[in-house]
Image (cartoon, rainbow, N blue to C red):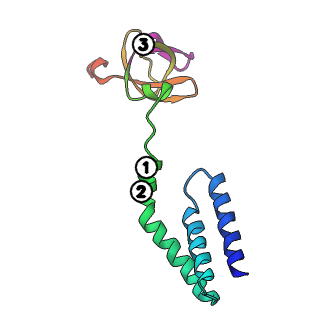
Amino acid sequence: MAELVWLIIAVVLFIVEAVTYGLVCIWFALGAIVTMIAVFCGVDNFILQMAIFFVSSAIFLLFTRNFFKKYLYRKAEKTNADSVVGTKGIVTEAIDNINGTGAVKTAGKVWTARSKTGDKIALDAQVNILEIQGVKLIVEQALDEQSPA
């Protein structure tokens, strides 16, 4: 009967793992399977079963977590819009946050743009693209384009 309980626990934990985005409880599901095997081999003591469950789960966690992180959570490469963040662009329409105007051309495309600091940025100025908010680029004037103080 105890092996059935551990099987149910393992199945529930695998289902929880399947519906979550990250590695949440896979190690505990594997620990439940190890405990179920131990019960099949004659371990009847509940406290010993719990110890096997926690120790085997911890061992799976310690020895496989880095492997899973390395191969399952590879850093996604920036695509489409995110790829322009950190690049430079040229102002094609003067940027004025108060009047809600501004456009920047980068990577062959023209985007609406706003200044991070609220400063006006003139036409044809070079800007650094800091982030994207919705469909607007948030920019700052490039240091080599600013007038001397």
The secondary element bearing badge 2 is classed as helix
The image quarter in which residue 86 lies: top left
- In x, y percent, where is residue 6? 67, 74
Point out the residue furthest to the front here.
Answer: 41
Mark 2 lies on residue? 67
Circle count? 3
Crowding around mark 3 (Cα neighbors within 10 Å: few <14, some 14 to 19, many 20+) is many
Of residue 86 and residue 40, the one placed in the foreground of this image is 40
Q: How far apart are marks 2 and 1 (CA)?
A: 6 Å
Label 3 or label 1, whichever comes before in sequence order:
1
Mark 3 lies on residue? 91
Check disc 3 and give the amino acid type. Answer: Val
In magenta segment, residue 118? no
The image quarter in which residue 34 lies: bottom right
Residue 137, relative to residue 19: is it above or below?
above
The secondary element bearing badge 3 is classed as strand
Mark 1 lies on residue? 71
- In x, y percent, where is residue 134? 58, 27
Point out the residue furthest to the right here.
Answer: 1
Q: How far apart are marks 3 and 1 (CA)?
A: 41 Å
- In x, y percent, where is residue 19? 66, 52
Quarter of the picture holding the C terminus: top left
Instruction: Name the residue rendered at 42%, 66% in the picture.
Output: 63
Mark 1 and mark 2 in contact (Cβ < 8 Å)? yes
Residue 80, relative to residue 57: is it above or below?
above
- In x, y percent, where is residue 123? 41, 9
Task: State left or right for residue 10 relative to residue 111.
Answer: right
Crowding around mark 1 (Cα neighbors within 10 Å: few <14, some 14 to 19, many 20+) is few
Span shown in magenta: 89-106
